[in-house]
Amino acid sequence: MACTMETVAKIFKGVLVVELLGVFGAYFLFYKMNTSQNFRQTMSKKFPFILEVYYKSIEQSGMYGVRKQDQEK
């Protein structure tokens, strides 16, 4: 079974599309969590581990107080 260049190109394009969708999806999710406290509350009920990653990432970047603000409401 020999792989032609066309087959390799199709596989590469498929992998590239999947990676781009992943990057844009992660950006959209971060943007939504960063701008909407209601969305963060929804995430805490459905996917608490993703919210924990969000809190840790913004704390690593130097933004503190979001977790405390969410816990107060």
Image (cartoon, rainbow, N blue to C red):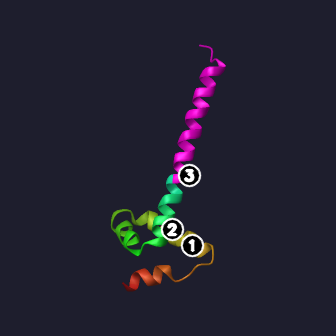
Q: What stretch is highlighted in magenta?
A: 1-24
Q: What element carries label 3?
A: helix
First of labels 2, 3 by sequence position = 3
For disc 1, the neighbor class at 10 Å (few under 14, some 14 to 19, many from 20) is some
Give residue 32's position: percent from left, percent from top.
46, 65
Mark 2 surroundings: few (<14), some (14-19) or many (≥20) residues within 10 A:
some
Query: Which numbered marker is on residue 54?
Result: 2
**Among the 4 quarters of the image, the one containing residue 51:** bottom left
User: Marks 2 and 1: in contact by CB < 8 Å?
Assistant: yes
Label 1, label 3: how many angstroms apart (C-alpha)?
18 Å
Type of the residue with mark 1:
Ile
Q: In this rendering, is residue 60 above or below 26?
A: below
Residue in the image at 34% along x and 63% along y: 46
* 41 is higher (above) or lower (below) than 12: below
Please identify the residue farthest to the right as the structure is shown.
Answer: 5
- Identified by mark 2, the residue type is Tyr
Quarter of the image with the N terminus is top right
Q: Which sits earlier in the primary sequence, circle 1 or circle 3? A: 3
35 displayed left or right of 64:
left
The residues bearing labels 1 and 2 have C-alpha atoms spaced at a distance of 6 Å
Choose mark 1 or mark 3, whichever is in front.
3
In the image, what residue type sits under mark 3? Answer: Val
Tag of residue 58: 1
Residue 12 belongs to the span the image colors magenta: yes
Is 62 in the magenta?
no
SS class, disc 2: helix
Please give the residue where the numbered disc 3 appears in the rendered image. 23
Q: Is the magenta stretch mostly helix, strand or loop?
A: helix
